[in-house]
Amino acid sequence: MNQAPILWLFFGLKGRISRVAFLLGGLLMTVVTLFVLYRMSAADAIEAGDALEFWNTVLSVVVFVSLWCQAALAAKRLHDIGRPGIFAIAMFVPLVNFIAFVALCLIPGEPGPNKYGAVTNAPN
């Protein structure tokens, strides 16, 4: 059975994705994290202890999942430029992750098939 494309995009480590898919996926992860931070600050502003604790837990889960998703997106983007996905570890290093994100948004992929896949934006 084939994996759902959205699950492959955010959790799979094989295949290739384009610069646009990488950028949009990264922005989605950022928006989700910022939304949770907003809700957490709103709960803190009204001094709701249970609500703040809930959003703090949600933030912890979202940050963990977001880190994995960013690394998975980066691995597939690296594959598109012909590099091994292991370099996606850079997405776990503060400041380096921002520089790597911008670089992966700007560097064009290899035209045509490469050893990581025949086409971009599709599971292998």
Image (cartoon, rainbow, N blue to C red):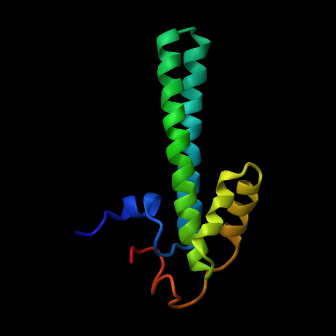
Horizontal arrangement in the rendering, residue 109 relative to residue 99 (left or right): left
Image quadrant occupied by the C terminus: bottom left
Residue 32 visible in the shown view:
no
Horizontal arrangement in the rendering, residue 5 relative to residue 97 (left or right): left
Horizontal arrangement in the rendering, residue 27 relative to residue 123 (left or right): right
The quadrant holding residue 20 is: bottom right
Q: Residue furthest left?
A: 1
Residue depicted at x 44% and y 58%: 11
Q: Number of callouts in the render?
A: 0
Residue depicted at x 57% and y 78%: 80
Horizontal arrangement in the rendering, residue 65 relative to residue 86 (left or right): left
Q: Residue furthest bottom?
A: 112
Front in this rendered view, residue 59 or 102: 59
Looking at the image, residue 32 lies above or below residue 54: below
Residue depicted at x 57% and y 20%: 42
Estimate the x, y position of residue 52 in percent, counting from the top left.
Answer: 53, 17
The quadrant holding residue 33 is: top right
Image quadrant occupied by the N terminus: bottom left
Estimate the x, y position of residue 45 in percent, counting from the top left.
Answer: 61, 13
Estimate the x, y position of residue 31 in percent, counting from the top left.
Answer: 56, 44
Residue depicted at x 49% and y 46%: 65
